[in-house]
Image: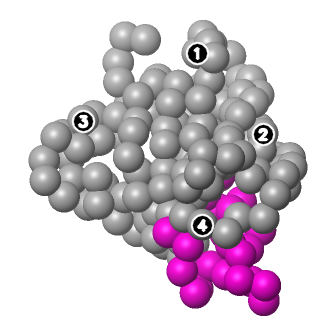
Amino acid sequence: MSQQSSTLITWQKFSRRWGGQWLFSRVVSHSAPYFATIRPRITALEPGLCEVRMKKRRKVQNHIGTVHAIAICNLAELAAGVMTDATIPPSHRWIPKGMTVEYLKKAATDLVGRAELDLVPAFDEARDLAVPVSVRDSNGEEVVRATITMWVTPRK
């Protein structure tokens, strides 16, 4: 990739400083306000990888005291979207096209969502990009597995 995305450049500047991960996460949440509901904390970002943490708190719990499904889906979509934005060249854009989700066990603790591509593809023509996301609890156990399909196209 000849050029880095503005998202990745911003992350590299912010993340080196004290409070930078928090500030970067707030900027992302401000640009897509529905993500603010989970109070995400982006902790790792590079081409092909994004890791996002969220705390279990009352506002993201369901009636049985575990993290509710939509909050977990928000976490997965955020990780996949930020990873995609940091991975594709500036000459391209993306939009989520679909999501499949497997709920593997109750999410009873803080969570970490990790979007990671085994191989970063070449981006030339329009294409689907399947982004796998693993959501794990504080014990390292996978609670949700998702695949988010991104539609990646050259900018006009």
Give the crowd class for mark 3: few <14, some 14-19, many >=20 residues within 10 Å.
some
Q: Which mark is residue 109?
A: 4
**Separation of residues labelled 2 and 1 (CA atoms):** 16 Å
- Residue type at numbered disc 4: Thr
**Numbered mark located on residue 8 in the image:** none
Instruction: Choose between 104 and 117: the one closer to the eye.
Output: 104
Which numbered disc flags the more N-terminal residue, 2 or 1? 1
Q: What element carries label 1?
A: loop
Q: Mark 1 points at which residue?
A: 120
Relative to 117, does residue 95 appear above or below in the rendering? below
- Using the numbered discs, state the Cα–Cα distance from disc 4 to disc 3 in whole angstroms: 29 Å
Residue 13 image-quadrant placement: top left
Q: Distance between the residues labelled 4 and 1?
A: 31 Å
Specify which label sits upstream in the sequence, 2 or 4: 4
Horizontal and vertical percent position of residue 86: 45, 33
Asked if the residues shown at circle 2 and circle 4 are in contact, with their CB atoms under 8 angstroms apart, the answer is: no
Closer to the eye: label 4 or 1: 4
Other-residue count near label 4 (Cα within 10 Å), few / some / many at <14 / 14–19 / ≥20: some
Does residue 91 appear anywhere in the picture? no
Circle nearer the N terminus (4, 1): 4
- Check disc 2 and report its element: helix, strand or loop: strand
**Residue 71 painted magenta:** yes
* Mark 2 or 4: the one toward you: 4
Residue depicted at x 35% and y 34%: 8
Q: Mark 2 points at which residue?
A: 147
44 to the left or right of 77: left
The verdict on residue 38 being magenta is: no
